[in-house]
Image (cartoon, rainbow, N blue to C red):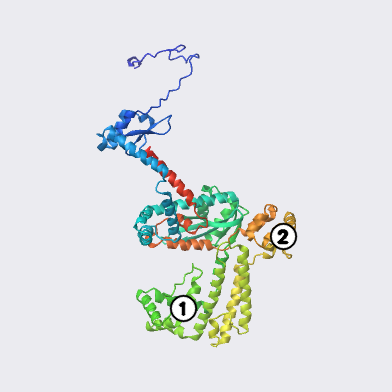
């Protein structure tokens, strides 16, 4: 077959061998690189609607009509003409003067864009501020177009006159714009938080999970870290969990986020959870997997959830009363006709409360509010149940039952007050333990007074003291004894005596027996430091120890490790409530993670930077069209 092949004779240079079986000659020179030719712009290309842009060493053709940039190799008449005929066929018969006028107009617009920011920078800034307010108020994004803009127009028209209305119309407030603004602010806050965590070097995590309206499980995470001269806490993330919601799934979700943010488990000093099986499983729980990565991590069980467990340990007699109340409320609330009849009856009898509340296990304040409302509306509820011929109407006529209802309303009100005092930002294990121990001491004091027949601490109950006082006091005394025992069981007291030096290193009763020699040396020297001692009373505790860390690093680092862990799920509860408001029935599929960050974050977005970034991007896009 080789005989039928037509071989072309190659031109041989000096030293080249024509024999294919022989190797290349050693005298062959190096192969020359292919020369790349950069095409230049010609004014005749304007007749095809093209001008030039880009680096002067390698110009690229830019279409005046659509703003599309072609490669340098396309800067030939045939390719430019093909673009005009295929992309803009209606303009293919236009002469060169038409495109010259178009170039002049776009040149003027380019100069205007350089002089004034695209979209009016003040209007863009106002758009960001409005989007932030919408996110913090948990309103739908369409509220800007449907309410805010019309309201602003009415106010401006009435106060400043019709001439100022054009300023309002320049502010971009469409629903899609609000969504984009919120996403930008969320990304900016997230970058700031992650950068602060990387600079801090240590942080504390708080995790909890809840189910949204669509039935999807959400993992919430908050973080506490050292920032400048204080300890700050902030929302970290909200992620969807798989259906199983195992400890392994929680650990994988948290680990993926930390790794993407450039963080390591080795920097996590403590983890706080609610003690569920997924977190505290024996083998594959979230906590066990964290300890494999960080053996020195401090694991804390949220004190608030422990107290919730205590409230479930009611004696049988009082638990029956609570079941009766739940049954009455369900009867009045779960039937549409009866649900409307009870408010009407309440209004006729002149009561201030609107409706009864459902009792929920998840919300820790629900029982106290439910019991207080039922007690105050007991006469109205009795009349309603009597009209409906319900058997529970007899219970509301029973004085012993009403006395027990009054005690439940009182004791749960005290528990609600304790819960409310443990809520808020910057709560730590020391302050929460003090409040738990203080409540435990009050329970002991109450029990002593109840045994003597004094019920002054229970405002509603003391009105029923005339009804079989001895039996009522005995029931209350037994419950208080049981409550005290459960407080000891679920909330074992921290050894706070050995941590008093964290609260006040200058106290004369500070115990230092569990300190190392270096820590004892530093606290001895710290007590003689007059400058820090004079500032101690004027500085917050975390700020004082961070200031002392420059001279006493070992002692200050241990103090910070005591103040960093979370003691309550306040931030998670705040996130759950915000998620419920944001994910309404109309928007249950909405991804609320970005909006939650803007809504509950204590770190504000840098709106000035976002405005300048958007201006630069808009100017780049516009200059491509106008160059």
The answer to whether marks 1 and 2 mark residues whose Cβ atoms lie closer than 8 Å is no
Q: Is residue 315 visible?
A: no
Image position of 222 with respect to 50: above or below: below
Image position of 328 with respect to 193: above or below: below
Q: Which residue position is annotated with label 2?
A: 514
Q: Residues within 10 Å of mark 1 (few under 14, many from 20)?
A: many
Image position of 563 with respect to 39: above or below: below
Quarter-of-image position of residue 517: bottom right
- Camera-side residue: 529 or 413? 529
> Mark 1 falls on what kind of element?
helix
Residue sitting at 51 percent across and 74 percent down?
368
| Disc number placed over residue 306 in the picture, else none | none
Where is residue 214 shown, x and y percent of the image? 41, 60
Mark 1 → mark 2, Cα distance in angstroms: 51 Å
Q: Which residue position is annotated with label 1?
A: 374
Where is residue 545 shown, x and y percent of the image? 66, 57
């Amino acid at each position: 077959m080789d005989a039928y092949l037509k071989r072309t004779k190659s031109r041989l240079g000096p030293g080249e061998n024509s024999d294919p079986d022989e190797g290349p000659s050693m005298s062959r020179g190096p192969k020359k690189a292919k020369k790349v030719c950069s095409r230049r712009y010609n004014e005749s290309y304007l007749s095809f609607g093209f001008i030039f842009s880009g680096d002067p060493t390698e110009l690229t053709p830019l279409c005046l009509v659509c703003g599309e940039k072609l490669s340098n190799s396309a800067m030939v008449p045939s390719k430019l003409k093909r673009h005009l005929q295929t992309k803009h066929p209606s303009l293919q018969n236009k002469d060169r003067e038409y495109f010259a006028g178009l170039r002049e107009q776009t040149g003027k617009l380019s100069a205007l864009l350089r002089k004034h920011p695209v979209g009016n920078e003040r209007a863009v800034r106002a758009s960001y501020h409005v989007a932030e307010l919408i996110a913090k108020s948990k309103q739908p994004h369409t509220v800007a177009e449907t309410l805010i803009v019309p309201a602003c127009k009415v106010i401006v028209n009435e106060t400043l006159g019709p001439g100022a209305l054009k300023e309002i119309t320049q502010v971009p407030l469409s629903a899609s714009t609000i969504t984009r603004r919120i996403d930008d602010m969320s990304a900016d806050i997230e970058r700031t938080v992650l950068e602060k965590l990387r600079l801090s070097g240590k942080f504390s995590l708080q995790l909890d999970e809840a189910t949204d309206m669509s039935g999807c499980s959400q993992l919430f995470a908050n973080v506490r870290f050292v920032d400048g001269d204080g300890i700050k806490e902030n929302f970290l993330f909200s992620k969807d969990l798989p259906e199983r919601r195992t400890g392994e799934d929680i650990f994988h979700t948290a680990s993926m986020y930390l790794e993407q943010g450039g963080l390591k488990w080795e920097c996590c000093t403590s983890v706080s959870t609610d003690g569920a099986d997924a977190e505290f499983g024996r083998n594959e729980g979230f906590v066990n997997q964290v300890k494999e990565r960080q053996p020195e991590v401090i694991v804390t069980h949220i004190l608030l959830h422990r107290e919730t467990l205590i409230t479930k340990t009611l004696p049988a007699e009082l638990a029956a009363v609570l079941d009766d109340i739940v049954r009455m409320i369900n009867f009045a609330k779960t039937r549409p006709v009866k649900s409307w009849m009870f408010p009407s009856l309440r209004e006729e009898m002149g009561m201030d409360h609107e409706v009864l509340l459902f009792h929920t296990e998840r919300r820790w304040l629900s029982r106290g509010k439910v019991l207080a409302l039922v007690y105050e509306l007991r006469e109205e509820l009795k009349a309603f149940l009597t009209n409906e011929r319900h058997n529970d109407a007899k219970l509301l006529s029973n004085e012993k039952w009403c006395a027990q209802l009054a005690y439940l309303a009182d004791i749960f009100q005290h528990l609600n007050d304790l819960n409310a005092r443990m809520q808020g930002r910057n709560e730590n294990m020391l302050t929460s333990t003090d409040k738990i121990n203080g409540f435990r001491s009050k329970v002991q004091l109450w029990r002593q007074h109840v045994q003597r027949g004094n019920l002054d601490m229970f405002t509603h109950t003391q009105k029923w003291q005339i009804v079989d006082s001895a039996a009522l006091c005995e029931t209350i005394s037994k419950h208080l004894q049981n409550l005290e025992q459960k407080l000891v069981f679920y909330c074992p007291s921290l050894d706070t005596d050995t941590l008093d030096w964290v609260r006040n290193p200058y106290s004369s009763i500070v115990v230092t027996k569990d300190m190392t020699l270096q820590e004892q040396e530093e606290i001895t020297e710290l007590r003689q430091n007059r400058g820090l001692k004079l500032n101690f009373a004027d500085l917050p505790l975390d700020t004082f120890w961070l200031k002392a860390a420059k001279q006493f690093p070992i002692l200050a680092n241990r103090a910070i490790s005591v103040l960093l862990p979370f003691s309550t799920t306040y931030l998670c509860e705040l996130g759950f409530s915000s998620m419920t408001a944001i994910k309404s029935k109309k928007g249950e599929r909405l991804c609320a993670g970005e909006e939650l960050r803007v809504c509950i974050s204590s770190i504000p977005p840098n709106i000035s930077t976002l405005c300048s970034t958007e201006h630069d991007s808009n100017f780049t896009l516009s200059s491509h069209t106008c160059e």
